[in-house]
Image (cartoon, rainbow, N blue to C red):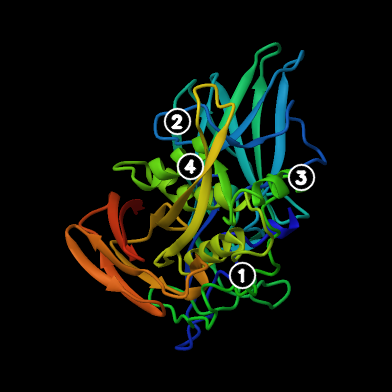
């Protein structure tokens, strides 16, 4: 969990403006798309069951999986309470609102509060109707906070829950609309980060060679571990006797990867996950170690940059990899043959962007490949296409809010791929 403390929000915040030291603030997501994770503080927790952080009960009237699920049943009527800790916390908040979506399977009183680690704010109560998703925007004043608070945890509770009634609470899209970079009044230090951000943020491109398997941590405090390997040493040796490929996946995994890359439509949340999931599928099925850059590190670094800019500057993720799959020769799959394949794919580390204008950058750091010649790439929005080369950034403008499509056209070694990416414009 410690290694996740800065994922998706690493180095967020901005300096106080030099002109008069005017206060600046920006929105920060605590939980969105299920990638942010979190944990329940065990001390004082009275929910019957621990949270599920990436559950999927389907599309719930505006709440799209994955989301947080808290469930249980007790043999006595009472209150269920717990303190949620998110990787983005602690943060100094002195303006704006707390946003979230909540839903319960029973009619119930829901409460939410903030804590600075030593004391709790006032509890804000909302009556939830059964099986209705309710978006909430709660001003700090509703928590009894008038002069700002260093938010360490978010408390949630269900109150007067009847006995022997199994109840589920769903929570999603948690975030603050305005996190300040003002100093913590108790410590005199800036608590929300110290890097220049916002809109047209300055960005220093890396000098990494895309085909190198080495990626130094740039925006995160630690390096990510590799995906766990799928094959035993014995199975690796057997496969290496049959192929020169670096990665061998099953035929079903191969079809899943190609279907995702060729998909004409998908939700913005699923679009965000597809690059990571495809690279996970291939790289964990490696036959050799240290073949390419760790996709997990690359992805979370890109996610951190998007969060640092308040989702206005987005790195484009690219993978250009040879692999192979094990294809069945007979109907019972008693024997197989190794078939060569290739993955040429792009991705975005976020499901949404702030505003109709987005700055897209292509840093060699975010290209996973073994090839010395990089793919030619162009990105199209509403029929207008712009080419982008490594160490370049382009500005894209969307026609409206809501889910929008980017068409990424890639050419590599004679292969042409057009991939649809989807993003929500907020």
- For label 4, the residue is 254
Q: Quadrant of the C terminus?
A: bottom left
Q: Quadrant of residue 53?
A: top right
Q: Is residue 48 visible?
A: yes
Query: Among all residues in the image, which is located at the extreme bottom?
Result: 19
Distance of label 4 from label 2 (alpha carbons):
37 Å
- For label 1, the residue is 213
Between 189 and 9, the one nearer to me in the picture:
9
Seen at 70% across and 45% down, the residue is 238
Secondary element at tag 2:
loop
Distance of label 2 from label 3 (alpha carbons):
50 Å
Q: Which mark is residue 234?
A: 3
Distance of label 2 from label 1 (alpha carbons):
45 Å
The first of marks 4 and 3 along the sequence is 3
Q: Nearer the viewer, mark 1 or mark 3?
A: 3
Q: Nearer the viewer, mark 4 or mark 2?
A: 4
């Amino acid at each position: 969990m410690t290694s996740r403390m800065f994922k998706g929000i690493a180095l967020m915040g901005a300096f106080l403006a030099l002109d008069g030291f005017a206060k600046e603030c920006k929105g920060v997501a605590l939980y969105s798309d299920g990638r942010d994770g979190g944990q329940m503080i065990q001390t004082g927790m009275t929910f019957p069951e621990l949270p599920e952080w990436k559950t999927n009960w389907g599309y719930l009237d505006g709440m799209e999986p994955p989301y947080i699920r808290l469930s249980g049943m007790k043999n006595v009527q009472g209150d269920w309470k717990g303190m949620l800790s998110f990787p983005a916390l602690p943060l100094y908040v002195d303006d704006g609102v707390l946003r979230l979506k909540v839903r319960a399977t029973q009619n119930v009183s829901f409460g939410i509060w903030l804590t600075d680690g030593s004391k709790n704010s006032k509890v804000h109560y909302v009556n939830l109707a059964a099986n209705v998703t309710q978006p909430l925007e709660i001003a700090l004043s509703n928590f009894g906070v008038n002069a700002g608070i260093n938010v360490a945890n978010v408390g949630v509770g269900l109150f007067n829950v009847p006995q022997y009634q199994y109840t589920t609470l769903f929570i999603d899209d948690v975030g603050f609309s305005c996190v300040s970079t003002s100093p913590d009044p108790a410590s005199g230090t800036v608590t929300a980060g110290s890097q220049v951000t916002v809109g047209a943020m300055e960005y220093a491109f890396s000098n990494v060679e895309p085909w190198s398997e080495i990626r130094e941590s740039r925006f995160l405090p630690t390096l990510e571990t590799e995906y766990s390997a799928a094959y035993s040493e014995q199975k690796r040796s057997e496969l290496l006797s049959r192929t020169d490929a670096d990665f061998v996946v099953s035929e079903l995994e191969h079809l899943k990867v190609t279907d995702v890359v060729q998909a004409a439509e998908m939700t913005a949340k699923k679009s965000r996950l597809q690059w990571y999931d495809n690279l996970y599928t291939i790289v964990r099925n490696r036959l050799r170690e240290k073949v390419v850059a760790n996709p997990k590190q690359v992805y979370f670094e890109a996610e951190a940059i998007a969060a640092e800019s308040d989702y206005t500057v987005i790195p484009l993720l690219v993978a250009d990899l040879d692999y192979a799959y094990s294809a069945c020769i007979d109907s019972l799959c008693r024997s197989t043959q190794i078939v060569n394949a290739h993955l040429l794919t792009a991705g975005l580390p976020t499901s949404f962007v702030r505003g109709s204008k987005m700055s897209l950058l292509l840093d060699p750091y975010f290209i996973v490949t073994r090839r010395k010649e990089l793919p030619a790439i162009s990105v199209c929005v509403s029929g207008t296409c712009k080419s982008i080369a490594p160490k370049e950034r382009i500005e894209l403008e969307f026609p409206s809010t809501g889910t929008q499509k980017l068409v990424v056209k890639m050419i590599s070694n004679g292969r042409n791929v057009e991939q649809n990416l989807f993003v929500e414009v907020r």
